[in-house]
Structure formats: structure tokens, C-alpha cells
Image (tube, grey):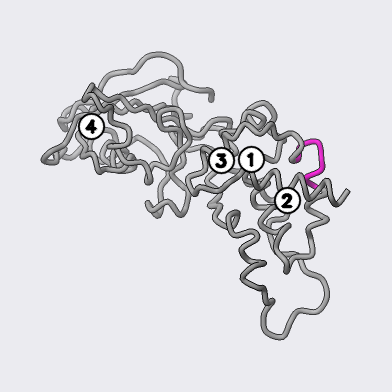
Amino acid sequence: MTQPPGEPDTVGSLTAATRPHTKPAPVPEGAVMVIVKIARFNPDNDRGSYWESFRVPALPTDRMLNLLIYIKSYLDGTLTFRRSCAHGICGSDAMQINGINRLACKILLKDLLPRDGAPTTITIAPLRSLPVEKDLIVNMEPFFNLYREIKPYLITYGPAPERERLQSPADRARFDDTTKCILCACCTSSCPVYWAEKTYYGPAAFVNAHRFIFDSRDHGAAERLEILNDIDGVWRCRTTFNCTQACPRGIQVTKAITEVKRALMFTR
């Protein structure tokens, strides 16, 4: 599925009569009315991809995830999306919100409202360059397959210690930033190189390689650097900073990729 073309479809009403089997829709006191324009796709019909819009009453302090749950609960129960923790930790609800990769549970409506009070339309679409399964759900396996290629686990040789593998606070701080990755795919699906070539490992894989390459307890740095020195490795990065801007955890992704490049240069 490609990005849905065309203009918004019918605007969903707030009354239960507009959708079968819906509950009466509550309107919170102090709510503002926004139009949520969602990319729709259902593999079980021949309609293809299209846009559908819904009128949703929401408080400025509501998260975008709240608006999606409202639509599914009261306007259209067929709307499909992923969610889990709702606290920016699991990465399940990554999607394009107004064209930018974000977590729906971390974006507040007030941050999307125009300051002049003009009518608000918010567009929501699935992550780019990953196969769409239904509506806002994408198949994450291509992303995870590339992630697994860089051996994202501790590699050690020799006998195991009697108790634990000790590490100083300074050594731990060396890779602290890249331990924050939640594998939401926001960075990788925002990368122009990944858009053009799906065999490119992508920013998320590089971040997780960085996490172990610079871990003083790990013995597999040379193996990972050899993988990342491949044609689909870090040298294809064009330093557009899309990945850093898209990361919901604030990881300095481009900096991590640069450090991996430097490690390759010094190793070589």
C-alpha cells in the first residue's frame, strides 16, 4: 500500500446513528471540535487505500491516542491501530501524525492546535515504507529482520564470571543514550535511504549496534563493525538528521551513526 491519495471522505458524525452498533458518544465539557483525517486500508475488500475523516470532540490535554480510541469506541469500530502501554515506552502506536513520525500516546492535542483558533484538521497515516496490513498497522518484520542482522545482544568469550560482569559508571555512560531505543521504527521509516532501498539496515539497527559496540563487557564489536561496513551499512547514511528528529526518546541517532563510522575508520 502506498500513501492514500485523494481528498477526505465523509466526515463522521458524533451521533450513534452514523455507525452501526456504536455507543452514545460523550462530549467532554470544554472540548474543541477537530477533524481527524485517517488513512484507511482493508485487505479484505477491494476499495484500496483512501482517506476517511471524523469529527471528534477533544480536550487540549488529550493525547492523539485518546482521539483514536474515541473514534474506535464511538464512531467506527473497524478502525485498526496498535497500542499497549500508552506511556511512550512500548513504541506500539508509532504512526505519521501531520506527516511526522510520532507516538500517538506522546503527542498532545494542544501542541497541534493552531494559535489563531482556526478549524483543526489532523492527518494520521501508517509509518512509511513498511507494508500496511490494515489501516494504521504495518508489518514490522522487515524492520526487525534488519535489526536482528547486527547481533543486538551481548557477545562474550571465555568463562563466565562467578557472579556478574562488572562495569564502571563511566563505561556505562559511554553508550547510555543508545540504550533508550524502544524499536518503534520511527527513525528507520523516516530515513530517505531506507525509502529507496529496503536492504539498508537503517538508523534503529545502527543505534542498537552502537549500544553493544561501545559496551566494555562485549567482545563482538569487530563482528558488528564488519557487518556495518557492508554496502547496506553505515556508509550509506546521508546525515539528513531525519532519524534524530523523529526519535520519540530523544536519542542522538545521527551522532551514534557518526561514532560507529569513526570506530570503523580507526579499526581499519
The magenta segment is: 227-233
Disc 2 target residue: 150
**Where is mark 4, residue-wise?**
56
Q: Decide which of 120, 72 is in the foreground and name it.
A: 120
- Circle 3 is placed at which residue position? 244
What separation in Å lies between label 4 and label 2 (alpha carbons)? 43 Å
Most common secondary structure along the magenta stretch: loop
How far across and down, in percent of the image, does residue 128 sit?
54, 30
Tag 4–tag 3 contact (CB < 8 Å) = no
Q: Earlier in the sequence, mark 4 or mark 2?
A: 4
Q: Which mark is residue 142?
A: 1
> Does residue 251 appear to the left or right of 255 in the view shown?
left
How crowded pointer 3 is (Cα within 10 Å; few <14, some 14-19, many 20+) is rated as: many
**Is label 1 or label 4 in front?**
4
At 73% from the left and 69% from the top, the residue drawn is 217
Earlier sequence position, callout 1 versus callout 4: 4
State whether residue 75 is above or below residue 50. Answer: below
Q: Position of residue 188 (x, y in %)?
A: 60, 38
Can residue 3 be seen in the rendering of this structure?
A: yes
Which marked residue is nearer to the observer: mark 4 or mark 3?
3
x 67%, y 80%: residue: 164
Residue pictured at 70% horizontal, 63% vertical: 215
